[in-house]
Image (spheres, rainbow, N blue to C red):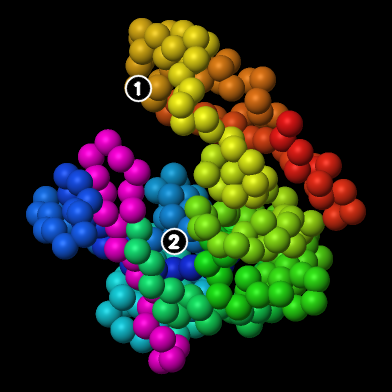
Amino acid sequence: MPKGIIGLGMWCVDTTYKINTLPQRGKLEPIIESFQCVGGGPSNVLSDLYSLGFKYPMIAMGSIGVDENASYIKKHCRKNKIDTKFLKPTQKAPTSHTVCMFEKQNERTFLYHAGANNLLDINHFQIQKLKSDPKILYVGYITLLGNLDKFSGKNTRLSRVLSQAKKKDITTVLDLVSNNDPSFQRIVLSALPFTDYLLLNEIEAELLFKKTVINSKKRLNKNSIKFLEKYLNNASPTGYEWEGQKIWMDYLKPYVDEFITDTYGTAVGVICLLYTSDAADDSLRVD
C-alpha cells in the first residue's frame, strides 16, 4: 500500500528582516529584527506535516549546493524527520536563498536568488530509487523550477514528471507562487492534465486566469462587514475553536466543494476543479 509523500521542487534558505517600511531609493532603514529559516513549498509542507504528527515517510527531492545553506537545510530536515538522501548536491551553483523584507501592516517583499534550483530537471525526480511508491507527490513552486518549467514540445518537462507519477497512481499536488512570469499561464496549463490538486491564492488566480479577482477599491461590501461583525463577536474570535470555525465554514460554503477540518478549529475549503486537456478554457472559466 502506498504511503508517504515526496516534496519535490525549490529548497532554499530564507533570511527575513523586520522593518518599519521599505526605504526610498538611496535611503537607509534600520532592521528591527532578523531571523533565518528553511523555505520553499516542499519544506513548508513536509515540516508542517511533521508538526501535525505525520507518521509516514517524507522524502525531499531537489537541487542544493555544497555550502553552509545546504547544511542548514539538511539539519532542518533531520530535525523534522525528512529524508534528504534524494536532495542532489551540485558544485555548479550555490544553494538557493531569499531575502524577505517584512513591513508592519504590509505584504512581505522578497528578493530571490535561484542558484541550484535553476538546475532542477527530470532526473531530480528519483521515484525509481525508492523501495516503495509514496501516496502523494507535492511539487512547488511552479515557474521557479528551473529546467522543469521549460517546454519539450507542447508540454513542460514538469508535465513528464507528473505524468510518470500518475501512471503509478500517485496523487499529485501542484503549488503556485506569485511570480509575474510572462509564461505563467502556459506553464501551469501544461501541468494541469496531470494534477489532482492545485494550490493557489488570489494573486496567483489573477495570473492564471488573466483577469481581476480582487477589486482593491471595493474589498468590504455590506455582506463582508456583516460577517466580520458576527465573527468578532463570537465566543472564540480568533477562530481557533469550533464556533469560530463554524462561522468560517458557513460563510465559505457557497464557494467550496468540501471542507477539511481538525479538532483544533482549523478549516480548509477545497475547490474541486474539473479539468480536461481538450477543454481547458471551459474548465478554467471563473465568470
Can residue 152 be seen by looking at this rendering? yes
Return the x and y of residue 35 as percentages of the image width and height: 21, 58
For the C terminus, the image quarter is top right
* SS for callout 1: loop
Q: Quick one: label 1, few (<14), some, or many (20+) residues within 10 Å?
A: few
Return the x and y of residue 4 as percentages of the image width and height: 59, 59
* Residue positioned 11% across, 58% down in the render: 28
Return the x and y of residue 33 as percentages of the image width and height: 14, 52
Total number of numbered discs in the rendering: 2
Whether residue 104 appears in magenta in the rendering, the answer is yes
Could you tell whether 221 is left or right of 168 in the image? left
**Corner quadrant of residue 167:** bottom right
* Amino acid at circle 1: Thr
Residue picked out by circle 1:
238
Q: Which of the labelled discs sits on residue 190, or is there none?
A: none
Q: Nearer the viewer, residue 151 or 275?
A: 151
Stretch of the chain drawn in magenta: 90-109
* Residue positioned 44% across, 68% down in the render: 11
Q: Which of the labelled discs sits on residue 40, or is there none?
A: 2
For the N terminus, the image quarter is bottom right
* SS for callout 2: loop
Return the x and y of residue 188 as percentages of the image width and height: 67, 58
Q: Nearer the viewer, residue 69 or 283?
A: 283
Q: Earlier in the sequence, mark 1 or mark 2?
A: 2
Could you tell whether 232 is left or right of 121 in the image? left
User: Distance between the Cα atoms at labels 1 and 2?
Assistant: 27 Å
Q: Nearer the viewer, residue 12 or 105?
A: 105
* Amino acid at circle 2: Gly
